[in-house]
Amino acid sequence: MSDSTIWLLGGLLGLIAEVVIPGVFLLWLGLAALGTGLAARAGLASFHGQVAVFVLLAPVSVAIGLWLRRRRTPVLNTSGSGLTGRAATVLTFEGGEGRVRLGDSDWAARLPAGGTAAPGARVRVVGVAGTVLLVAAEPVQG
């Protein structure tokens, strides 16, 4: 069995292991092994040269994988991701702080400086600060 075939099989095994074993590390090493196998097939005959190619391709492929992961990762489960933009009903408010009902839960809420809201009024969640909803009065539609 030639060196290039061994590298290519090793790369394919890395890709298959990535599917079977959770994580995303073996994918990049498998791709580095495939690249080394292609370099060996293209004429890189020296075993030391093949190892050097793999040693260069492995960290480059892992770095590319990390870069792609960082670039594509959406921000999920942030404090306001599911609450911002939703409508709530005012329960009580005094001096810009009070409570609102959102869904089936009561939440501490804060209005912008100088804002007021009567019980039963509709407000819109504009942000979240810890466990306090930042709300703004909804415009009256008529």
Image (tube, rainbow, N blue to C red):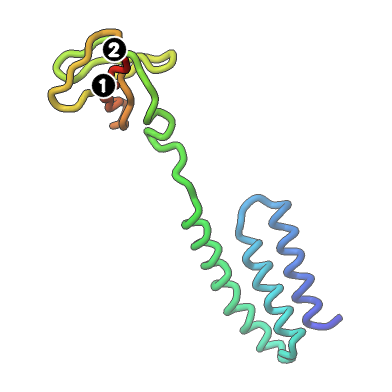
Residue shown at 56% from the left, 66% from the top: 62
Picture coordinates of residue 6, whole percent (x, y): 79, 76
Q: Tell me the crowding category of disc 2: few under 14, some 14 to 19, or many 20 or more residues within 10 angstroms, Cα based.
A: some
Q: Tell me the crowding category of disc 1: few under 14, some 14 to 19, or many 20 or more residues within 10 angstroms, Cα based.
A: many
What's the residue type where badge 1 is placed? Ala
Q: Which residue is mark 1?
A: 137
Foreground pick, 83 / 117: 117
Q: Secondary structure at mark 1?
A: strand
The vertical placement of 46 against 57, above or below, is below
Residue shown at 28% from the left, 15% from the top: 99
User: Is 63 positioned to the left or the right of 129 in the image?
Assistant: right
Give the number of callouts: 2
Callout 2 touching callout 1 (CB < 8 Å): yes
- Disc 2 to disc 1, how far (Cα)? 8 Å
N-terminal of the pair, mark 2 or mark 1, is: 2
Foreground pick, 69 / 112: 112
Picture coordinates of residue 110, whole percent (x, y): 23, 23
Q: Secondary structure at mark 2?
A: loop
Q: Which residue is mark 2?
A: 121
